[in-house]
Image: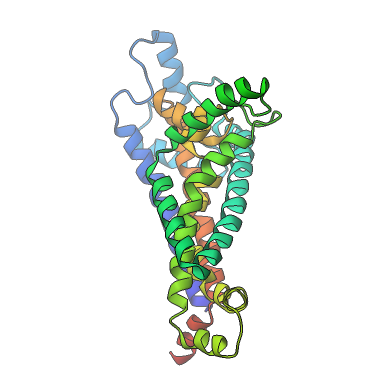
Amino acid sequence: MLKKIFSKLLRSLVVIISVITLTFFMIHALPNNFIDEELDESVKEQIIKTYNLDKPITEQYVKYIKNVVKGDFGKSIKYENIKVVDVIKKNFPTSLDLGLRVILISSVIALLLAMLSINFEKIDRLFLLFSSILVAIPSFVVVGLLQFYAVYIHKELLGFSKISIIGYYGKGQKILPVLTLVLYYLPIIFKLLRKKIKEEFKNEYVEFAMSKGFSINYVIRKHILKNIFPSLITSLMPYFVSLITGSFIVETLFGIPGLGRYFTTSIIERDYPMIMGLTIFYTIILVIIFSIMDILVLLLDKRLKVIEDEE
C-alpha cells in the first residue's frame, strides 16, 4: 500500500514539473511573446529587464522554476505591478465558493432523481429526456435565457427583481450563476449515478438484500452508494476540479471576479505571465485533488485490498 501511495505521489510530481516545463517553453516559443511591437522602446526595455528576456532561455527556465517553488509566478503584464499569485489569492476563493455550491446542490438533487429513476420506469424515461436536452444546450445560451428572465420577464411582470445578473457578492447575485452551472452539471451527475446504481443491482449481494425484504431505497442508501463511491468520485473528479478552479464562460458573462474570468482575459490580452501562472496553478490543484482521491480510493476500496493481499 505504501509503495502504491509513494508511486502516485512521485507521478504527480513528474506531471507538475512536466506541465511547468511544457508551458514555459511553449510560451517562450511564440513570436514576440512578451513584447508588443507597438510599445515604446523604453517600455520594451523595461519588459525585457523585468522578465529576464535578455538571458539565455535555459537560465530563464531555471530561474522561473526556482520562483515557482517559492510560490512566485511573476508579475502580470496587463495589471501593472500586480503579482499573479496575488490575483490567485484574491480571486480563487470566489471560484471555490461558486464551485462548492454547485457541487453540493447538483449532487444532492442528482441522488434524489437517481433514486426516483430507479423506482419508477416512466419517470426514468422523462429524466433521461430532460438530461439529454440540458447537456445539449451550451452554457452561454442558458446564461442568456436566465438573464432575459431576470431582467425583462421577472421585472416587467412583478415590477421589481431580486435577482441580479452581474456580480457575485451582492444581494441576489449568486442565484443565476449557481443555477446556470447546476443546470449543466446536474444531468451529468444524474446519468453517472443512475448508470452505476443500475450496474450494482446486477451483483449477488443486492439480490440477497432484496430477498430479505429490504426496500430498493434502503439497499441503495446502506449498500450500493458505499460500494460505488470510489469509482463515482474518480469519474466526477474532473468536473469538480473544473468547477472549483473557475468556470470560464459563466464567470465572464456574469462578471464574477473569479479565476476563470482572469484566465479568459489573459488569453485575449496576451498576458503570458498570467497564463503561465494560472495554468500551473490549475495543474497543481488538479494533481493534488486527484492524488488525494487516488489515495482515498486505495484506502476505502475493499476490493483493492483483497487484490493486494492475494499478491
Q: Is residue 4 visible?
A: yes
**269 vs 143, nearest the viewer:** 143
**294 vs 247, nearest the viewer:** 247
Q: Residue at x 38, y 39 (%)?
A: 24
Q: Residue at x 43, y 42 (%)?
A: 62
- Whole-percent x, y for residue 310 in the image: 45, 92
- Whole-percent x, y for residue 233 in the image: 51, 63
Q: Quadrant of the C terminus?
A: bottom left
299 relative to 79, above or below:
below
Q: Quadrant of residue 128?
A: bottom left
**259 vs 271, nearest the viewer:** 259
248 relative to 217, above or below:
above
Picture colour scheme: rainbow
**25 vs 300, nearest the viewer:** 300
Q: Residue at x 50, y 28 (%)?
A: 253
Q: How many marks?
A: 0
- Whole-percent x, y for residue 3 in the image: 49, 76
Q: Is residue 111 left or right of residue 47?
A: right
Q: Is residue 95 left or right of residue 30?
A: right
